[in-house]
Amino acid sequence: MDLAEKLNILSAAAKYDVSCSSSGSNRKNKPGGVGNASASGICHSWSQDGRCISLLKILQTNFCVYDCAYCVNRASNDLPRAAFTPEEVADLTINFYRRNYIEGLFLSSAVWPNPNQTMEALLRTVKLLRTQYRFNGYLHVKAIPGADWRLIAETGTLVDRMSVNIELPTSESLQLLAPQKKRENILQPMKLIGSQIVESQEERKQSRKAPAFVPAGQSTQLIVGATADTDLRILQLSESLYRRVHLKRVYYSAYVPVSTNPKLPTLASPPLNREHRLYQADWLLRFYGFEAKELLNEASPNFHLQLDPKSDWALRNLHLFPLEVNKVDYRFLLRVPGIGVKSAQRILTARRFHSLDFEDLQKLGVVMKRARYFLTCKGKYFGQIPYREETIKEKLLAKPTKVENYTQLALFSDVEDQQPVQDALTSITGEL
Amino acid sequence: MIIYLYDGSFEGLLTAIYEAYYRSEKPEQIMAQQSYQPDLFSQPRVIATDSDKAGKVYDAIERKISHEALEHVFYVYLSELPGVGTLIYRYLQFGWRVGADINGHLSLEPVREVLRISQKVGVERHRMLGLLRFKKIQGELYYAPFEPDYNIVGLMAPHFARRLADQNWIIHDLKRGVAAFYNQERWLIRELAGTGQLNWEENEAFYQELWQNYFQRIAVEGRTNRKVQRQFMPARYWHHLIEKPTQ
């Protein structure tokens, strides 16, 4: 089988992995070497589904011993199989990299014939790139659950990011859809990688020469909508991963039907809106100081699809608002719907020099459509409607997304109001 | 209305700012000579570029205002947008008064405008670091043509000099006829109008085809979203890409 055909098979097999981030590492190039990592990450293209292409995302092989119902590469699925040699992967990576197509390599693998041999193959490829090809660009490699820790640890010293995909948030769903896998086996390498990262960061504080271990951190992925798990359950899991295992990112992937297994739901289209809400909430956990239990509870365990999680929270806590924009401190500023990290920082800078008006806020990038109901400027409230949950909620509710892609425009209709363009955008970037 | 005209270079612009400070005849506008249209009311004054004077302004911005302000001024200059000469003049006039705090005064139009334009130039630079495509020419040389909105080739060269340190490359701004040349040791910028016929390395077509196929395969069909794709990667940049997004 020639290289082109292998690339076709093994890239199509890898596309359901969401992660493509190339940020968080500032690996330097070495004399005689090629490549470096950019701390901010660089996107090199955007595919037809609007997702950023930053890394060459491929599987080492798609031969698999597992038969997980949700996975396109499951053993019982009849599709062409292939395997790369380490040399082939290295050659592709280097040649794409030298032409500036990519920022680095995201190498994953199906498990064949057992976890150890799979992990060994990944390690061989990574080693070849780093030593023989003197490649110093970004590498993201999967840790294979069940593989010997020494193999995973050695890989960790060579790459920028590692990830283990949890995929299904609870043991029950795992039992239902992937009975060959054990939750403990998945979580164990994550914990080990997490503590090794913390340890190496400590060592590097003492000595700059101490070797780096997975400098861009660890990530994972959860599938949304393949099982009955609630948003609350998923968000709590993410929260504990961030707090206890020091994960850098949790990715959420709306389930795209790849099988007609009766254990799986039949969906007309992937639950993209739900995935979007989870990303918004994820950002609230990491950058806005929220906790999962503030956003959701057992009584309402799923996100409102027409209302973003922060607005939803603010409406339930109207007694904390409205806040005076010229006085309130950063922590609370971040909790105002329509104010993001950047605009909150701009507000802090700007108000050192003069006190802010309603018009100033607009220029600073605050989304007044939402923020106006929760703020006062110099003591004045600009909401222009009674300060009650129902009235504000009515204003904030996004119009349901239209099924048709045309609309009859009325002479005085507000076009901007009708299309949640921003939603479509942020569902990809995950940024609020 | 007094208008100072400079030769279009950054040094020229800084010289004009120097003169505006010391001459009694204060300008209302500062613009590049090429973009000046004579009219009934304007009184043009041609400013001769003087690297000593320019150097003084350069140091003064860094010392009396901030390094950050200097960077913003340079980025705004590179945008080549109409009116940026005057804008930079107004920004600095205010900067001499308030010093390092200048960028906190977001309520002032020139400050906001400088930050906005500087950000746009920075965004395009970052975008092109990803979207630039090299093709391999016979004789171990990589060639990347592009047509950016702003004059950013000099902002991109250091990045590729670090990253692709062990290859020879040329980054060619076709729109402005300038290019950055790198020979595995250092880079420099020279004028380069055209290239004539280029002979591609024999493997070039093979890797281009692999990349095109990869680009098609990596999209998830159920999630097609052309709108977002175009938002991040505007169609005006597609011409020089190897991959072919469909309209």
Image: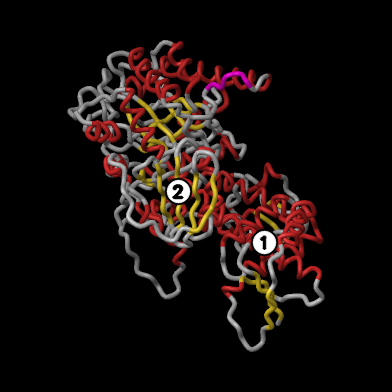
- Identify the element where label 1 is drawn: helix
- Check the residue under mark 2 and report the chain it is in: B
The disc at residue B11 is: 1
Rounded to the nearest angstrom, the CA distance separating label 1 from label 2 is 25 Å
At horizontal 56% and vertical 39% (from top left) the residue drawn is: A284
In the image, taking residue A214 as reference, residue A165 lies left or right, namely left
Q: How many marks?
A: 2
| Residue A233 among magenta residues | no
Q: Is residue A187 visible?
A: yes
At horizontal 79% and vertical 55% (from top left) the residue drawn is: B99
Rendered view: A260 above or below A115: below
**What's under tag 2, amino acid-wise?**
Ile
Over which residues does the magenta segment extend? Answer: A209-213
In the image, taking residue A322 as reference, residue A279 lies left or right, namely left
Q: Residue furthest left?
A: A78
Rendered view: A92 above or below B127: above
Q: Quadrant of the N terminus of chain A?
A: top left
Q: Residues within 10 Å of mark 2 (few under 14, many from 20)?
A: many
In the image, taking residue A205 as reference, residue A276 lies left or right, namely left
